Amino acid sequence: MYKIAVVPGDGIGKEVMEATLHVLDALDIEFDYTFADAGDECKAASGVALPQETIDIVKESQACLFGAAGESAADVIVRLRQELELYVNLRPVKSYPGTKALFDNLDFVIVRENTEDLYIGLEEETEEGATALRVTTRNAVERICKFAFEYAEESGRDKVTAVHKANVLKKTDGLFKDIFYKVAEDYKDIGTDDRYVDATAMFFITNPQMFNVIVTTNLFGDILSDEGAGLVGGLGLIPSANIGENSGLFEPVHGSAPDIAGKNIANPSAMILSAVMMLDYLKEHDAARKVENALIEVLSEGKVITGDIGGNASTMEMASEIRRKI
Amino acid sequence: MYKIAVVPGDGIGKEVMEATLHVLDALDIEFDYTFADAGDECKAASGVALPQETIDIVKESQACLFGAAGESAADVIVRLRQELELYVNLRPVKSYPGTKALFDNLDFVIVRENTEDLYIGLEEETEEGATALRVTTRNAVERICKFAFEYAEESGRDKVTAVHKANVLKKTDGLFKDIFYKVAEDYKDIGTDDRYVDATAMFFITNPQMFNVIVTTNLFGDILSDEGAGLVGGLGLIPSANIGENSGLFEPVHGSAPDIAGKNIANPSAMILSAVMMLDYLKEHDAARKVENALIEVLSEGKVITGDIGGNASTMEMASEIRRKI
Ligand SMILES: CC(C)[C@H](C(=O)O)[C@@H](O)C(=O)O
Ligand SMILES: CC(C)[C@H](C(=O)O)[C@@H](O)C(=O)O
């Protein structure tokens, strides 16, 4: 029995969450769900986008499934990441069959630092405009680099690439690069290299096969993971895991998509794959593979899939089809 | 007669510059070139990557052709942009025939702010690590947005998109977004919208046709223009113009490429197209079209092109072929 916080949030968050719980229900695992509110609707109803009660529920759970928040996304998700010290944001870039992926057989992972950088919220108005502080601490860099190498080791991957802009950000990203290579010394079996973020954005398109595990700072990870989503057929397919010492929060990379919300047409795959990441986090690896393989089968058949990837099934129809294959 | 500063720099910078001057030589325009040093080799020889003499030569010229600098690129090019107040970095994303462009008929432009943001160089070591200051001033934002709208008007483009991360960077990018829409009021015929930088990185791949003119901050422009290069066949094809009130500096988006330097195999197109941008800047539009069309012809024929785009011609062979078509 796992205690799971469920935060559907706004827009398609609710729809893909319902679809995902329907799929998880087919597993032989007991989940004790506690539902909690967050996002724009919550703010409209209660005055705050992220009530303390929600934070508490998430803190008291073993893991959290998070759908999407609308305009208030930054206030909700960035705050949750910081409150729970979810210092890793793990974002796989993996091409699945039957999708509009530009490349077949893409399979790399972005390990995004999740607590600092320009996300720290130190902005100020000045006479001439405004400033924001980019913060890089040795501790945060060290733990994210360690995580990347541990992750590479555990998942049998053989290279970690640090992505930075140390030619311009000599002190902050210089530190990132230095610590990366220092941490690497403890992992002699794993290859290393480093790239500038701009060049990386190009190589994603011209030669993505060169990447295996990428470790990078918060904002670069944000941008690159969306670019990665583009490579493998769009945001409808990209899950993510926010992981800390004591908890994990699993959410699709996509947002609340107000343009298609309420129509039951959103692709549930990103949320379902986020649940797969949660299962792996809970060490329920068999169950994780079952769900992932069922999804792969449905994508391969290409019959009961949503419109964004070329089908015409509804969110729940696709979810039911996946559930049937489990 | 135009006074032009020529800074070949390091690595392939020298090769593509020679190729470009060979092409320009076929035009019926007189250029008075003054050569100047900058970059790694210059630093090794003289102790500084960007001698004051070079800055002076560039300042006294009507335009500057710049090749590439190696490791010292940031110290050279970022400083030149700031010293000369080259506040616009104009980067077309245009697919040419016969290249490995992912999309045919792509033709949009990135207008990158070129003087501030994290490029301002305000980094500090702290007890826990380091910080960098992101600076956004009303003045800089206003002039770059104005430039984008003026550019759209002059080039017959009908939409300007502001790219930012105002959900997280509420004050700095919030200001950027506000000023963008304020400036837009003076250009009622041009459409507007705005996007998050992460979503933009995805849309570049899944739906790049939605963009026409993009205006964005310095670092986002850096990353997105390299991604744009990936879309249209790689850095070998992407020129850029750094433009201020009194001068213009024209350089390929690619760097000095030490791995292929000295082999006479670098693609000269990005540098030649940078010279085309210079010709347009000097209002030599006929000459600009002549060179560009000659390049397009050579690319279309696909016979005398360099290895990066599928041929086996040398840098100078490709340049000579272009020259022949002028
Ligand atoms: C909603 C936003 C604050 C968030 C981020 O920038 O981290 C999102 O883009 C993401 O990648 O999870
Ligand atoms: C060399 C580097 C400092 C430069 C930049 O970041 O602006 C380059 O990447 C560019 O885009 O011209």
Image: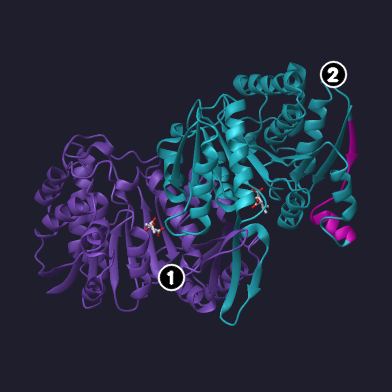
Chain colours: A purple, B cyan
In this image, B163 relative to A278: left or right? Answer: right
Mark 1: amino acid: Thr
Using residue A206 as the reference point, say whether residue B89 is left or right of it.
right
| Of residues A141 and B16, the one drawn nearer to the viewer in this rendering | A141
Nearest the eye: B52 or B97 = B52
In terms of image quadrants, where is residue A129? Answer: bottom right
- What residue does disc 1 label? A115
Secondary element at tag 2: loop
Depicted A49 relative to depicted B298: above or below = below
For mark 1, name the chain. Answer: A
Q: Residue at x 36, y 41 (%)?
A: A101
Chain letter for mark 2, please. B
B45 sits to left or right of A238: right
**How far across and down, in percent of the image, does residue B27 sit?**
82, 20
Residue range highlighted in magenta: B32-46
Tell whether position B38 is magenta. Answer: yes
